[in-house]
Image (cartoon, coloured by chain):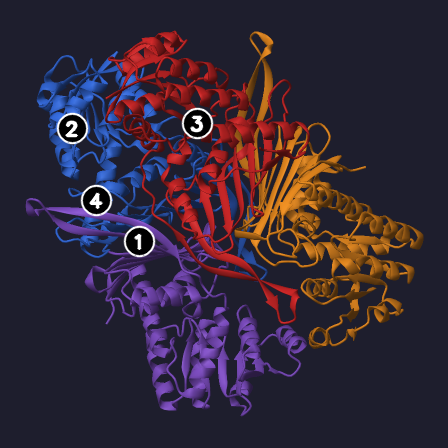
Chain colours: A orange, B red, C purple, D blue
Amino acid sequence: MIKIGVIGYGYWGPNLVRNFAETNDSSVTYVSDKRTDRLKLVQSRYPNTTVVEDPDDLISTPDVDAVVISTPVSTHFDLAVKALRAGKHVLVEKPMTCTVEEGEKLLEEAARAQKTLMVDHTFIYTPAVVKIKELVSNGDLGRLLYYDSVRVNLGLFQHDVNVLWDLAVHDLSIMDFILGEQPTAVSATGVAHLNNQPEDVAYITCYLRNNLIAHFHVNWMAPVKVRRTLIGGDRQMIVYDDLEPSEKVKVYDKGVSLNEGPEGVYQMLVSYRSGDMWAPHLATTEALKNEASHFIDCITNGKKPQTDGEMGLRIVKILEAADKSLDNRGQPVQIN
Amino acid sequence: MIKIGVIGYGYWGPNLVRNFAETNDSSVTYVSDKRTDRLKLVQSRYPNTTVVEDPDDLISTPDVDAVVISTPVSTHFDLAVKALRAGKHVLVEKPMTCTVEEGEKLLEEAARAQKTLMVDHTFIYTPAVVKIKELVSNGDLGRLLYYDSVRVNLGLFQHDVNVLWDLAVHDLSIMDFILGEQPTAVSATGVAHLNNQPEDVAYITCYLRNNLIAHFHVNWMAPVKVRRTLIGGDRQMIVYDDLEPSEKVKVYDKGVSLNEGPEGVYQMLVSYRSGDMWAPHLATTEALKNEASHFIDCITNGKKPQTDGEMGLRIVKILEAADKSLDNRGQPVQIN
Amino acid sequence: MIKIGVIGYGYWGPNLVRNFAETNDSSVTYVSDKRTDRLKLVQSRYPNTTVVEDPDDLISTPDVDAVVISTPVSTHFDLAVKALRAGKHVLVEKPMTCTVEEGEKLLEEAARAQKTLMVDHTFIYTPAVVKIKELVSNGDLGRLLYYDSVRVNLGLFQHDVNVLWDLAVHDLSIMDFILGEQPTAVSATGVAHLNNQPEDVAYITCYLRNNLIAHFHVNWMAPVKVRRTLIGGDRQMIVYDDLEPSEKVKVYDKGVSLNEGPEGVYQMLVSYRSGDMWAPHLATTEALKNEASHFIDCITNGKKPQTDGEMGLRIVKILEAADKSLDNRGQPVQIN
Amino acid sequence: MIKIGVIGYGYWGPNLVRNFAETNDSSVTYVSDKRTDRLKLVQSRYPNTTVVEDPDDLISTPDVDAVVISTPVSTHFDLAVKALRAGKHVLVEKPMTCTVEEGEKLLEEAARAQKTLMVDHTFIYTPAVVKIKELVSNGDLGRLLYYDSVRVNLGLFQHDVNVLWDLAVHDLSIMDFILGEQPTAVSATGVAHLNNQPEDVAYITCYLRNNLIAHFHVNWMAPVKVRRTLIGGDRQMIVYDDLEPSEKVKVYDKGVSLNEGPEGVYQMLVSYRSGDMWAPHLATTEALKNEASHFIDCITNGKKPQTDGEMGLRIVKILEAADKSLDNRGQPVQIN
């Protein structure tokens, strides 16, 4: 039985607490939050959980084996380092840290502590993304040509991070998981429309190997909600629409190939193929439930998390490079 | 009665011929095409039209008042210049020319000849785009924040131009018409997946005044057809979906504003407003029919076309700058 | 503070308990259920609520002012009568009773007891249905021509009632509320596909005054979920799609009229009008929350519920007539 | 080379003429129409076709082998009989005749004349319907449970026939083709909203063998266009949406079965199965082109048409029975 302490009971914290409370082999022993009314809410829902204002009390108690950090990004690094140094396993909200520098230090701390460090990139644990990963890994799509995602909506406006760190972080983690490959360079554009506020509309292009290109569109000010990803291969193509209630993943037996024309290479012929469409049945388990079980499993059995600190760092690297490019109107930025 | 000669009876030419044949005050007296079978087809459909292989015969005859050029882009400049020098009015397919340099020369020729020069940016003549222009011009949307368009599909692969010059040209012309303003800089990215073939996937960001940003996504290799534009203002927002059979334009009474919080400017509050949605009724007239009438009207009454050479040149300037940026992975390129 | 006792903590009961627990001016003092595990669940969630197995204990205690009945239909009548005789107000799940006879007796009991009797026709309390009622009552639609609803899905199979009593009951209550009028006759068809099971697919036509016709399609075995109602007037028409996340109600400025032709009444001309479409903004409050407040308000202030016993009885009358017609393959059945 | 004469160049006639003109092995030698302007239009489009006002001239000429009848329903019988007696093959618009009596006489005439009699039930020749027929015939759906179709729209108002004979005729022919079985009884309801005009909204339930039920909803006054058919089997289910541009047919691996519970037949368990969805690729050939070729093939090779007079008569029988039921508010009518 892994004893979990959750720091932060704001927007996402309640989901984390609920899932760890309902997962076998774990219990939520502590919750901390600076706001008294949030702690009262925890108490009414979980009478057996200890609530504290100061996260240090949670980190230092022997009654916590693993710390779950669900606080603003700027606090992730300090809290995670403290927890690791106190000998706790750590699950931290995405994005893992504010900078690459912090991210690299955090990985060193985790290695030194020999504890599990996992990042809460929740989408990786959805049945839809797991299915797409399987289809791409099998080679069903053929050679990959492009990856294109849109995540827009008239939604919550974050004051502390821009729309890339708030929304694109989801899609970058999905891409990382599906493609298993880090971009070599990025170009990003975007603007802030409200004074003293971060960028609210942004676009990123990532360059990958073999002419594979990935593009991300994120927007906090769109009149309609769109959560759609296209993944094109030369044999098959996928449309992943997260808003579809049941058929979230559609696989199109469509592709394109280049053949020599009757007069040789100087007259190449492009041919299109259009066949059936297929929507695989997907399980309906909640992603966070899968993720909570996976975290417990990694702690218990010393496994490497699917969304480990290395992955968290890769995402932060892309975001940091994208910010730099965005400030220079799309000027490309290399990723080491 | 304006006598029309049409050069090129390939993919688009038949639509041009049909519309000029059916428009009052014009008749199609000549059609030229290098391919005998295409000319035979013209003859069977329009027994009274003269068909010739050599476009020079069409340009030089006194039986043609206006020349309509529907041939590959690389031939536009030469044919248009010849026609203007022969004293003919000219309607040329989009994009107007291959380069800015050609475009500027063509405008000089038209000025010298004192003839009408119009570019076939067909979408400007659709009821949907006319309605959006009206809504934006009225100020109904408030301050404009962003313009975002997607035009993708598993479609025809052009060998002579890349996907920007084939597809983005439509959306750039729509933006030019609606915003009435030229971008100051562009950043573009994209890749070619087939050897010795032009780019088939591309993205452009255009920077305009007052933090207005416009973005274009075009793709010849998408499994699904999408033709959707979002236009966000701080008072209202528009979704223009060209594939909707009847409600192509939807106006959302949604917006966002920034207000001082109780503790002053250091604590700004973003507020969202969400109200009704409204889809104006649109006429169902064919765009090309409107365009043909407009061309005849401009010739007859000496009016300035809505899609005149100046506009054609503005679009070519964006495309040329985008190509340059795309070659440098998004490096921004200024537009004079 | 009204003290609520809820009988039945199965599928719907938890929603009732939660809403009455969260509504001001009411508290849930008792819950009864025959199943021990359900009572344990209640206790873990609401430590201050008394749980009992026998509903009679709940009905007889002075610690309950109003009884909410969320049990199989066959038990509604007995429980509701007992509760009224014990001087309690009653909110009963839909359909109110199994038969018209029971329904009439129940209304007599409520009149005698001078207590509030309300039926849980939840849809009447949704912002969408309230908005439609307003539009129809205002006369915005002109003369009503037809009402057509579809409610289908691969869903729960009820063993105790057929698909009419399970699904059509929703739409009949919405129609009753919107039209404010009882059908004069019904014709219904349907079949049972599984041995010894009730009808799983059914259709009802209701005849109303002035050539208004209403039709209902319900199906437990459809591969896709549809919840759509069309309401046609000669001036405007409504599409109500309950599965749309935000634009559930669309009002079409479309209509049809009959005019005399140039040669008089023997040559009537039908003319169609097609104009704008408009989707009013709807509040997002939970229907059951509105309903719970309304029930408390009716008890406290002696108001007549919008979904009172009279309405509950009207719906049961239609269902009973529809069953009779269905058994005779559509033979029409009059409603008194 | 079969010489075709087409009677009636109104709404549908031009499509028939075009397809027979473009089909190999046939030419359109004659067209007749009472309206001079329509004949002029034919002449401008088909200079080699003879145009006449009187259909008798077309029927009697040796320069016509087969007569295509595209006129109001009330004239079908007389024209078709004349053509058969003149030794011509006949393709007649749907519905074949106004009454069963006429239909039976027409079949006798065709048998006597030993000529091909085919009915223009166009949908039978669409790739979508052919694919559905194949899936149903293969037994892929398991035991069929229900067939449900909706065809509604604010459309043309027919003055000579009601909405059943105008719209339901399409779906009845599709059902006849797919199920290969005639209903034993029908119940229909509907109303006429405009004085002296036919019914504009109607519903039909058809009873078939083995508890299979088919239902049809047609409406000339709906604000939105819907063309959707659900076909449910106990193993798979189909959704056929004719308005989808490419994925018109979707096959759901969903079904329902009844199993004995642990305590035997008195406690049956209904179990649902939900699996993948699959949309077969469909050819894009025009239905009428397939139909024209089929008619020529039947004439030339003495084949029995897929939409022969027998089928045309079956549809008229259902329509006549439905009219009778509709007049009696759903009272069931047997079909012999």
Marks 1 and 4 in Cβ contact (< 8 Å): no
Q: CA distance from mark 3 to mark 1?
A: 40 Å
| Residue designated by label 1 | C253
On the rendered structure, is C124 left or right of D334?
right
Residue C293 location in percent, x, y? Answer: 48, 78
- Looking at the picture, which amino acid does disc 2 mark? Glu
Q: CA distance from mark 1 to mark 4?
A: 18 Å
Q: Which tag is nearer the camera, tag 3 or tag 1? A: 3
Decide: few, some or many residues near mark 2? Use Cα within 10 Å; few <14, some 14-19, many ≥20: some
Residue A238 location in percent, x, y? Answer: 59, 37
Residue A124 location in percent, x, y? Answer: 70, 48
Marks 4 and 2 in Cβ contact (< 8 Å): no
Residue under disc 3 on the same chain as residue under disc 1: no
Q: Is residue D239 above or below residue C292?
A: above
Extreme-front residue of the structure: B112
In which quarter of the view is residue D117 placed? top left
Res C321 visible: no
